[in-house]
Image (spheres, rainbow, N blue to C red):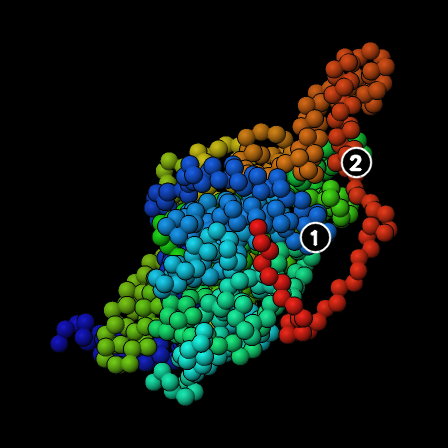
């Protein structure tokens, strides 16, 4: 008898039976969600020893000449056509000219292959387009992003039949058809599996002939583009009570493509999401009959809807919402830095007050971090990955930081951003924040259930394999598989423990780092915290097993650490890819120091609340022996980051690249900013002469006519920027809207506007 068989039968076997009662079981929906994507850098972080050389070899996301031309051409033209105040407060919609332009330039077909008439852009180009439009109008950006993310187009390309692709994709690409996707219902929000919308297999008449099909009944809400859609991707539960397909009755969540002119479909009414003007509303279907070839992918795809939805949601979570969040952060940085420079109180720019500088620095660092994470994620997508855990990290991390940036921008602008009107360039972005926080997986549940809940299974190097072995029906086969994986896991954990202990006690001094990088100290500390995270995760899984996923507060803290490690990695990658710009070092340092502090705090919270106290005491020795020693960014770093967005230069331009300026409120702010900077030397000269008002200097003959004119122009520009809007009372009067509870009461259906 071999040593391996003795180990398996006498050591592994009791562990195997014990593990069956400890490790979490996966439900069918959890299994489908995990199998829907793959892993990437998240898995590397879970090893506890990320390979930094492989990290630096990841090629950065780039644009083709065609994609760049589209950004500089049609996207700029679109932004110039948009009047966000008019869209939001007068029309509650994009103008007919804008709709026609979007269709003509194939904005709705960015992800559709050229052979179907689409643009076939990369994920990075898709992201850049959404980001740039978002800096001009949230409503326009959402209108463009939805058909290119959670719309039938994405699902058709992944799962559609050839006939379905040939019919629908050309029509979606040129805008003849407007898509929407019906997922959320009154009974099922984040828990999509609890939906009551259903389809029943039956025979019926369709286009004059009797066919085997399905009779659908549903009630959906929060559906973007739904009120004007011509084709609705519909998620529902399929049943076959009469056994017409020869199998069981409950067939699972299924997706079908529903032409909205089909009898029984009701669309048209609108929701008003946080006063945003993008088209969104409820829809319902009553006894809608369609043949089985309306099922996405054909009848053989019945019951595969949950897997499809998780695959499609990754685009919205990983590209669209992070792009919009990065846009909001960059717009905040560009405008808030400029406003803090031109707006004075007590005869000095408000950006000189350290309380304001704290907000400016956080805005600048968030802008740097979010765009770094957006680009890094697009790099992974370009390599062919579809990382579902990374998508959840991006959705939660990006939208939460967008919320922070919006709050900080509002605080610095104060009354300027509070008073609505055409000259308020922040208010509508601020109002839109809850939409991003809520959609495509509410942030509360994404943080507490998905990031670590799925990451611990999918991205961990061994847990999923062990769970698969434990799920094997044949005990001896499962035992053999478990034996092979488990002991490899044990060796890995011992190595991680040694690594975590050494790095914790030396603060990462001897950790791995690229030799050529001036940022070596950041890599080493990242390695320290990655080892601490990996060891703490293994200890939690060992001691709590399946109960860990019910301890949502602990799971959320683990998820925060994993998210922070990923986002900080992205910031390092950006700094390396952009040529190690010394001007950007304050931004990188802010991001890293802030992240290190957050990780240590979360580790402490995990240790303080770890239910198995002896394990917590032991774990503390290995991962946090000195407690929380980080203190966050230094004051000098805060001042440098604030100064970076208050001064013109390459660093400010890199940080806010492709923020649309135009000639409206943001454009006028930029003009005032430029004039204030240009006239600063004149103000400095007068300060030396103890002259407070340049007009006195003019009267005393100390200024040339050109200097006087430039100072006068700067004052006028600043006065224009600082001014807020006011209205005649009758201009604010609106006829009352009459809401109803159900879309079934709609007395008409709004059809797609013609070009």
**Number of marks:** 2
Cα distance in 3D space between marks 1 and 2: 37 Å
Residue furthest to the left: 1
Q: Which residue is mark 2?
A: 345
Residue 345, picture quadrant: top right
Q: Return the residue nearer the eye: 375 or 534.
A: 375
x 39%, y 48%: residue:
114
Residue 631 in the image, given as x and y percentages of width and height = 58, 48
Q: Is residue 701 visible?
A: yes
Residue furthest to the bottom: 242
Give the position of the N terminus as an image quadrant.
bottom left
Residue 605, picture quadrant: bottom right
Q: Report the disc number at residue 121.
A: none
Q: Is residue 86 above or below residue 717?
A: below
x 84%, y 20%: residue:
695
Q: Which residue is mark 1?
A: 91
Which element carries disc 1, helix, strand or loop? helix
Residue 578 in the image, given as x and y percentages of width and height = 45, 36
353 relative to 312 in the view: left or right = right
Residue 48 in the image, given as x and y percentages of width and height = 39, 56
Q: Residues within 10 Å of mark 2 (few under 14, many from 20)?
A: few
x 53%, y 67%: residue:
260
Q: Return the residue nearer the eye: 525 or 308.
A: 308
Foreground tag (1 vs 2): 1
149 relative to 516 in the view: left or right = right
Residue 679 in the image, given as x and y percentages of width and height = 71, 22
């Amino acid at each position: 008898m071999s040593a391996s068989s003795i180990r398996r039968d006498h050591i592994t076997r009791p562990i195997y039976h014990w593990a069956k009662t400890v490790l979490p079981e996966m439900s069918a929906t959890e299994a489908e969600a995990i199998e829907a994507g793959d892993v990437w850098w998240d898995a590397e972080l879970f090893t506890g020893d990320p390979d930094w050389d492989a990290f630096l070899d990841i090629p950065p996301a780039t644009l083709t000449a065609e994609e760049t031309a589209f950004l500089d051409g049609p996207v700029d033209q679109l932004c110039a056509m948009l009047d966000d105040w008019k869209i939001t407060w007068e029309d509650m919609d994009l103008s007919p000219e804008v709709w026609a332009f979007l269709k003509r330039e194939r904005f709705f077909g960015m992800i559709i292959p050229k052979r179907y008439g689409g643009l076939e852009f990369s994920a990075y180009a898709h992201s850049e387009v959404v980001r740039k439009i978002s800096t001009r109008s949230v409503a326009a950006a959402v209108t463009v992003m939805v058909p290119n993310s959670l719309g039938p187009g994405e699902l058709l390309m992944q799962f559609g039949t050839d006939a379905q692709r040939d019919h629908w994709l050309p029509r979606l690409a040129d805008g003849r058809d407007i898509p929407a996707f019906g997922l959320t219902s009154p009974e099922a929000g984040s828990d999509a599996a609890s939906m009551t919308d259903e389809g029943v297999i039956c025979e019926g008449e369709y286009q004059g002939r009797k066919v085997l099909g399905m009779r659908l009944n549903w009630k959906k809400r929060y559906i973007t583009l739904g009120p004007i859609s011509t084709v609705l991707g519909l998620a529902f539960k399929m049943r076959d009570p009469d056994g017409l397909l020869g199998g069981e009755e409950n067939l699972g969540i299924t997706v079908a493509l529903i032409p909205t002119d089909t009898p029984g479909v009701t669309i048209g009414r609108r929701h008003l999401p946080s006063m945003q003007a993008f088209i969104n509303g409820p829809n319902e279907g009553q006894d809608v009959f369609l043949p089985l070839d309306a099922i996405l992918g054909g009848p053989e795809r019945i019951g595969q809807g949950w897997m499809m939805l998780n695959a499609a949601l990754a685009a919205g979570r990983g590209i669209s919402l992070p792009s919009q969040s990065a846009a909001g952060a960059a717009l905040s940085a560009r405008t808030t830095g400029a406003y803090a420079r031109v707006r004075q109180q007590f005869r000095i720019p408000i950006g000189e007050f350290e309380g304001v500088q704290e907000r400016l620095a956080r805005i600048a660092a968030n802008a740097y971090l979010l765009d770094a994470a957006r680009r890094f994620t697009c790099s992974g997508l370009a390599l062919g990955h579809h990382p579902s855990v990374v998508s959840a990290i991006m959705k939660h991390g990006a939208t939460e930081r967008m919320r922070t940036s919006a709050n900080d921008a509002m605080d610095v602008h104060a009354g300027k951003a509070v008073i609505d009107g055409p000259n308020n360039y922040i208010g509508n972005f601020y109002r839109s924040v809850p939409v991003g926080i809520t959609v495509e997986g509410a942030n509360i549940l994404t943080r507490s259930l998905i990031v670590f809940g799925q990451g611990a299974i999918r991205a961990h190097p061994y847990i999923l394999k062990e769970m698969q072995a434990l799920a094997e029906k044949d005990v001896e086969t499962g035992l053999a598989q478990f034996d092979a994986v488990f002991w490899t896991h044990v060796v890995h954990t011992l190595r991680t423990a040694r690594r975590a202990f050494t790095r914790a006690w030396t603060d990462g001094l001897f950790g791995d780092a690229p030799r050529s990088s001036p940022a070596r100290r950041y890599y080493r500390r990242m390695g320290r915290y990655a080892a601490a995270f990996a060891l703490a995760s293994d200890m939690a899984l060992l001691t709590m097993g399946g109960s860990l996923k019910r301890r949502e507060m602990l799971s959320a803290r683990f998820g925060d650490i994993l998210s922070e490690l990923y986002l900080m990695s992205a910031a390092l990658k950006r700094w390396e890819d952009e040529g190690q710009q010394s001007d950007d070092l304050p931004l990188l340092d802010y991001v890293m120091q802030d992240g290190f502090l957050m990780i240590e705090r979360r580790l402490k919270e995990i240790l303080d609340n770890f239910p198995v106290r002896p394990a917590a005491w032991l774990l503390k020795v290995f991962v946090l022996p000195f407690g929380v020693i980080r203190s966050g960014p230094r004051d000098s770093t805060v001042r440098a980051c604030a100064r970076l967005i208050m001064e013109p230069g390459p660093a400010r331009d890199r940080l806010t690249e492709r923020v649309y300026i135009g000639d409206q409120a943001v454009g006028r702010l930029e003009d005032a900013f430029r004039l204030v900077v240009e006239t600063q030397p004149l103000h400095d000269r007068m300060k030396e002469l103890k002259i407070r008002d340049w007009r006195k200097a003019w009267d005393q003959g100390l200024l040339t006519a050109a200097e006087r004119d430039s100072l006068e122009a700067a004052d006028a520009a600043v006065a224009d920027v600082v001014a807020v809007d006011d209205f005649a009372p009758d201009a604010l009067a609106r006829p009352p809207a009459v809401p109803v509870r159900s879309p079934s009461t709609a007395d008409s259906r709004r059809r797609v506007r013609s070009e």
